[in-house]
Amino acid sequence: MPYVDPQTVLTPKNIVRDVHVIYDSGPSPNSWSVALLDWDGEEAVAMRWNGEEGNGVGNPQSHARPTWFVVPGPMAAVVRARAEELNNSKAGGLLAGYQAMAADQEREAEALEWSEALIADATRQQR
């Protein structure tokens, strides 16, 4: 079976809720993901290999259904921070968005004009 979209990994159904994928390397060899999810009522950072052609449903899995590996508490913050950093810096991520906005000189000029108008409004309110 090919790549499994991590957003759809909700097993075991009575334990996993509210999956928010922080990072997904996408459908590629050695594809993996990190998610923030509700694991039996507790917020948890979890990881998984997403699978690829001929590799079942990825890993971990239970009874041929994709599942998550919950990252141990002492490592959770580090894994989450790095996954967010990777997501923001990948093609089409937050960093790319900021770079595109900064390159749009017309939009930058509009933003400057708008922010200057806010300063003028605040100055009038203080009088």
Image (cartoon, rainbow, N blue to C red):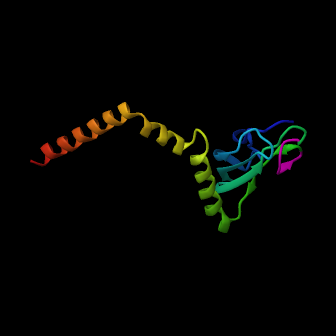
Where residue 7 appears, as percent x and y from the top left, is 69, 40
Q: Position of 113 compared to 106: left or right? A: left
* Residue at the outermost left position: 127
Residue 58 occupies quadrant: top right
Magenta stretch in the rendered image? 56-63
Image vertical order of residue 46 relative to residue 21, above or below: below
Where residue 78 appears, as percent x and y from the top left, is 63, 63
Q: Position of 25 compared to 120: left or right? A: right
Residue at 50 percent of width and 39 percent of height = 97
Q: Position of 11 compared to 109: left or right? A: right
Residue at 37 percent of width and 34 percent of height = 105
Q: The N terminus lies in which quarter of the figure?
A: top right
Q: Position of 106 compared to 63: left or right? A: left
Where residue 23 appears, as percent x and y from the top left, is 65, 47
Where residue 110 appears, as percent x and y from the top left, is 31, 33
Q: Nearer the viewer, residue 7 or 25?
A: 25
Question: Does the magenta segment cover residue 80?
Answer: no
Residue 71 occupies quadrant: bottom right
Q: Nearer the viewer, residue 21 or 110?
A: 110
Residue 13 occupies quadrant: top right
Q: Main secondary structure of the magenta part?
A: loop
Question: Does the magenta segment cover residue 62?
Answer: yes
Residue at 13 percent of width and 43 percent of height = 124
